[in-house]
Structure formats: structure tokens, C-alpha cells
Amino acid sequence: MIAFGQFLEILIGGLLSGVLYSLVALGFVLIFKASGVFNFAQGAMVLLAGLALVRTLDFLVARGLPFWAAVILGVVFAAAVMAIAAFVIERYVLGPLVNQDGLTLFMSTIGITFVLEGASQMIFGADNYPLRLFPTDAWFLFENQFPGGILVSKLDVWGGLIAGVLVTALAIFFQRTKTGRALRAVADDHTAAQSVGIPISWIWFVVWLVAGLVALVAATVWGTKLGVQFSITFLALKALPVLIIGGFTSVPGAIIGGLIIGAGEKLAEVYLGPSIGGGIEYWFGFVLALAVLMVRPQGLFGERIIERI
Amino acid sequence: MRSPEVNDVMLRVERVSLAFGGVKALTDVSFDIRKGEIRAIIGPNGAGKTSMLNVINGFYHPNRGSITFKGKSRPRMRPYEAARGGIARTFQNVALFKGMSALDNIMAGRTLKMRYGLLWQALRVGPARTEEIEHRQRVEEIIDFLEIEAIRKVPVARLPYGLQKRVELGRALAMEPDLLLLDEPMAGMNLEEKEDMSRFIVEVNDYYGTTIALIEHDMAVVMDLSNRVVVLDHGVKIADGTPDEVKTNQAVIDAYLGVAH
């Protein structure tokens, strides 16, 4: 029974931490789906959103505002910062690059990354700022069945709930609204989208805004977990195998990919670690992604790419 | 030769010049398109025909000259403003939304006609629901008209070229345009497909009264379909008139056959 209890604990912990990877991966999927651009800057956007939030929060609390009011104002302010970033990115970087190919756009997002990283730390500071939005202690479940019970982190559960709400909202937005259809159209063909009367600059603003808001949500959870600091940008690297496994174009894929990697790496660490050496967590996702690339390059849920020759 | 009622001017191109760096794509080109007519734009390769269409629907902005559409002249019209004003087009190399079905592609043409906001659409209730159904009906009519019922759910990337061109025409028709720009609608088609496409173009013009500007290389098609023809060569207008007038114009014959300089 101890062994099974331990297995359950690792599995649940792994699945939930996988959802946190998915939160970051979602931002990538959104922009890729809607503009065909792999947005290298997603990690930097999480940093910017997190810093804007935590610094406003600290500032307002220090001025004697009640915590809940400071949270609301902080979120509103951070959302406004992401909206400004989206506007500037569209206006000065992507707007002038309409009708260029995907690689050009990708390179421009690398530039955006450096500017965002530098600017956000210049404006808001470059320390590690702790964020306390969600409880960080744990529950112990099924203490009667298993000795010591199963440890479940409350923060991870919050992360899971938030991801669920986010995915539902995004799925509805993409599948059912005119703007959602316009987003998919723009991703497919800029020229054709313009010709049927879709204003590309507006659509790109919406996409970057939504990706910025998703980054803000990811920042609330990850900021609580790690503190808001520069290394949060490396989350982008963790999200990469999630994208490859789930497929770059699929919102549910980002979630499933996160679950697979989260559970897989924790289980591998505990059960394979002793025999092949520790640290499996750090490379497990990438090796899995490699395997998926060989078998199903479009990912488990991605759209099949058909090339006519 | 056909002759529908041709009355006032829908679009006027006045002394338009366009250059990319040192390359002159169009030089001082003027012509008009009258309401209800089929106007052909012809010329040898590189004559500036596609550039002309791109200027008309706002992909390019002319360096000099003006475009007056339905009495309004706008110096720098953007493509979506052109679409909003009632200009639809198809492309030489087929520009469809490849990941979407034929039906979704044609639905995308309805973008501008949809009125109700995000929330209503997301919830699929109330006026947005009725509206979606209305748009579906219009789109189904177009699908019937173009005889592509069988492929409506197929992702367009899997369709043969001729059918892709038809879907693209469908998307343009879904916009219910006043002016339809067709860039080589019959390129790469076999005889049967060409005949189908010609029939659709004539019917659109007759039935919906849509004004059409058409670039085409197949002279037989041009002479059959169009009311008037404008001929470009090296970015300059060399002739303008009825198909018969243009056919016998010496400058046109020289441009196509080449003359010793």
C-alpha cells in the first residue's frame, strides 16, 4: 500500500505541475495559431506581466491599501501594461512586416524578447520579488487509506483550476466567434485575409493582447511558486517540448502535452532515477519530444501539414 | 460579344504611376470601369496588370495619381477598407485559407457582414444565432451556384487547382461585392474547367449585376466575355476599347508579337 500511495502522490503532483507548463505553452499556441509565428518572446512576456503585477501590489500594500484591493488594481495595471506592449509590438515590429515569411517574423520575436527583458527590468527592478496570491501549503488526502496520506500542493490545484477556465474560454473564443475565425484566417494567409476585409493590424493586436493576458495568468501562478525574477523567462524552454508533443496549433494539445511531460518526468525521476542516475526531470521532456518528432512531426493534436508539390 | 446595360462610372483610375525603387511598374495609367460591365485588362507578361489590381484594392499605394471608387477618392486606401467599400478579388496563385474547409473559406468572406458581437456569438444565443443561420444560407446558395456541394467539408489544400479557384471565387462572391477583381481566373485550367468558369463569370455579372474587372491571357475568353478591354505594356496603357477595336490595334499587335526596334 505504501508503494501505491507514493505512486499516486507522484502522479498527481506530476500531472498538476504539468498543467503549469501548459499555462506557458498556451501563450505560444495562441500566437502560432493566429499568426503562424513562433513567439520566442513568450517567456519575456511572463516576466513583464509578473513584474508589473508584483511591483504594483507591493507599492499599493505599502501605501496601506487592503490586500484584495491591491490585487485587483495590480491585475488591472498589469493587463494595461500587456495591452500597451501588444500595441507597440504590432505597431512598430509586426505591422511593418505584414506578408513577410514566418522565419522573418520569428527573428523579430527574438528582438522583442531582448527589448522586453531589458525594459521590464529597467522599469520595475531586477530582484527576486516574492508574490503571494495563492496558498503554498499542501493538503494531505486519504490519510486513512495510506500512511501519511497523499501530499497535494494547493498551489498546483489552483494552477489546474485556472488552466481549465482559461482553456474553456479560449476554445469558445476561437471556435465560435467571428474574431476567432478571422484569427485563423490571418494565420493561414495574410493577403487573402486582407482581401476579404479583415484588418490585420487589429487582429494582431488582439492576438498579442490575449497572449499577454495568458502570460499574466501564468505569471500569477509561477510567480507564487518561484518568485518573480529573471529566470522565469526560462519557462519558455520548458514549454517547448510541451508544444512539440501537443502540437503547435492545438489548445487542448498544450494541456495534454503538459500533463504527459509533468507526470512522465516526475515518475521517471523517482522510478528510473536510482538505476540510471538522477536529474531525469531536466531532460525527460526533450527526449520525449524528440521521439514524438520522429513519429508524428505535427504533434499529437496538431493540424496535419499537407504540401502539394 | 455581349452588351448589358452599361451606364455610369464605378471606378476611375487617373494618371496612376507606381514604382518599386527604380523599376516602373505603372506609368501614367488612366481608365475607367463602368457599372455593370465586364472590363478586361490584358497585356504581355510583366505589363503591370496584377500591379494595377493591387493598386485598385489597396495592396499597393500609387506614387502618383488617384483612384476614385463610387465617387469617392482616397489617397491611401488599405485592403480592408477596399473590402468594406465593396471590392472583392481573387488571386493569380490562389490565396485560400488552406487549413480550413471550402465552407469555412467561403464563410470567411462573410466576415464584414456579421454584426453581432463576441459575447453573443460565444454563447450562440439570441440574434447572433439567427444571424449565423442567415449567413450559412447565403453561403449555401453560393455553393449551389458554383456546383461545389460535394466538397464543402474538404480542407481546400486537398482540392485540385481548378476547384480551389472556384472556392476562391465563392469566397469573393460571399462578400456580395459591387466590384469583383479576378486575376487570371482560368490560368492552368483545361478547356472544360475554363468553360465552367466563363459561365460562372457571365452569370455573376448577369444575375447579381456585379461589375467585374478581369485579367486573362486566353484571348478567346477575353473577346467572348468582356465589354471593353484595356491593354497594358511595360506599365503603359497602349490601347482601350471594345474587343474588336483592340484586336485590330497596331500597337497591341506589336506588343504581343514584338517589333524590330
Image: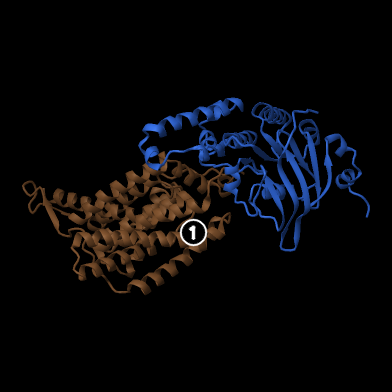
Chain colours: A brown, B blue
Residue that protrudes farthest toward the left in the picture = A144
Q: Indicate whether B145 appears above or below B256.
A: above
Q: Is residue B45 left or right of residue B206?
A: right
Q: Indicate whether A264 appears above or below B149.
A: below
Residue in view at x 66 percent, y 38 percent: B180
Q: Indicate whether A24 appears above or below A185.
A: below
* Quarter of the rendering containing residue A308: top right
Percent of width and height locating residue A221: 26, 58
Total count of labels: 1
Q: Is residue B69 left or right of residue B43?
A: left
Viewport quadrant of the C terminus of chain B: bottom right
Percent of width and height locating residue A151: 14, 54
Residue in view at x 45 percent, y 59 percent: A87
Q: Chain letter of disc 1? A: A
Percent of width and height locating residue B75: 65, 54
Q: In the rendered image, is residue B27 in sight? A: yes
Q: Is residue A216 left or right of residue B159?
A: left
Residue in view at x 78 percent, y 42 percent: B42
Q: In the rendered image, is residue A234 in sight? A: no
Q: Secondary structure at mark 1?
A: helix
Percent of width and height locating residue A236: 37, 61
Viewport quadrant of the N terminus of chain B: top right
Q: Which residue is mark 1?
A: A90
Q: Nearer the viewer, residue B156 or A292?
A: B156
Q: Nearer the viewer, residue A28 or A281?
A: A28
Q: Residues within 10 Å of mark 1 (few under 14, many from 20)?
A: many
| Residue type at the position of mark 1 | Glu
